[in-house]
Amino acid sequence: MAAANATTEERKCPIETVIHVLGGKWKPTILWHLLDATRRFSELEKMIPEITQKMLAQHLRELEADGLVVRTVYPTVPPKVEYALSEYGITLVPVMQAMCNWGEVHQTSAWKPTEVARAING
């Protein structure tokens, strides 16, 4: 049975892996806000006002479990916790920038594929 699962995993589309890791409404947004700075939980809450505390905490835990985010707890009173991209998470920077570029073009165009392609490809 393990061999059958390995075969299925080997055939898995790489996009499925990306969706599994970055899936969810808020994960890309959280990562985007961590691209340029280390952030505290409360900062992320303010930057993403639509997200609930529960969902933010859940997504941060998942991103940490996937090795994309590092959580640092400082022994202070009150406790200070910061989140930052890990070295592995930094490998997503070009992906996030490409997504941002595509999103900007998509927002400003009338969704004409040829114009979008021209804007992206120069």
Image: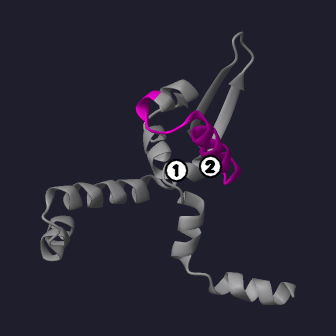
Q: Quadrant of the C terminus?
A: bottom left
Q: Where is residue 34 in the image (x, y as percent from the top left)?
A: 48, 39
Contact between labelled residues 1 and 2, with CB atoms less than 8 Å apart: yes
What residue is shown with label 2? 63
User: Within the image, what quadrant is residue 14 found in?
Assistant: bottom right
SS class, disc 1 = helix
Crowding at dot 1, Cα within 10 Å, few <14 / some 14-19 / many 20+, comes out as some
Residue at image location 43% in from the left, 45% down from the top: 32
Which residue position is annotated with label 1?
Answer: 27
The CA distance from mark 2 to mark 1 is 8 Å
Query: Quadrant of the rendered structure where residue 110 is?
Result: bottom left
Residue 42 counted in the magenta span: no
Which residue occupies 66% across, 46% down?
Answer: 64
Instruction: Return the x and y of residue 114 as percentages of the image width and height.
Output: 14, 76
> Which residues are the magenta region?
46-68
> Is residue 111 left or right of 38 when viewed as pictured?
left
